[in-house]
Image (cartoon, grey):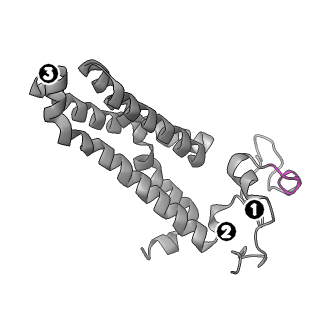
Amino acid sequence: MEKSKDVESGKGPSSVPHWRLVFDQGLVTDEVMNWPYPGSGTDEDPYVVNWITNDPRNPQLFSNLKKWGLTMLVAIATLAVAFVSSAYSGGIREILVEFHSSQEVGILGVSLFVLGFAIGPLLWAPLSEMFGRQVLFITTYAGLTAFNAGAAGVHSMAGLIVCRFFAGAIGSSPLTNAGGVIADMFSAKQRGLA
């Protein structure tokens, strides 16, 4: 299998162990430190930070297999969150009997989850630009799982509604950032073909 190549030099990405790429978010190598970035570092002429040649963290240089694998992963993550939002409605009748609640209170579990969908992106979009999309996907999916487990184990309607709200707010991360992941990996020309 041929590795992806840098357009200018024709060389593939420099060799960095896979697990270091996964867990070392900064990945500052000697090549990064010694790269001749344009600019002088002053207010009048600041450094222009861009991808170095053959940077293994450049998503445009990922292999097609990795790009499409990550595309499928974010698509499945988005589908899972959408499924979690509506799966609750199938058991509302049983929830009302279990917690002796009214129909209006039972529907709050769906309503507040969707409200979380509206509030969460206001936080996740800027945080993905600050800390990276990988860290955000992992932590928010862990949070979504924790609040769904909490919703399954609560003993009150109020606890269920609170867990549903936070699951929606935290779980909205893939809805916000899946498009950014795809835009990072595929050029505008390639995305136009989809």
The residue that disc 1 covers is 55
Q: Along the line of sight, which residue is nearer the eye, 167 or 175?
A: 167
Residue labelled with disc 2: 61
Residue at the disc numbered 3 = 101
**Marks 1 and 3, the one that precedes in the sequence:** 1
Say whether marks 2 and 1 touch (CB < 8 Å).
yes
Q: Position of residue 128 (x, y in %)?
A: 55, 43
Q: Residue at x 51, y 69 (%)?
A: 188
Q: Is residue 174 magenta?
A: no
Q: Is residue 48 visible?
A: no
Which segment did they paint magenta?
28-33
Q: Secondary structure at mark 1?
A: loop
Q: Residues within 10 Å of mark 3 (few under 14, many from 20)?
A: some
Name the quadrant containing residue 166: top left
Foreground tag (2 vs 3):
3
Left or right placement of residue 56 versus residue 40 in this view = left
Give the spatial CA distance, label 2 vs label 3: 54 Å
Residue at position x 23%, y 35% in the image: 110
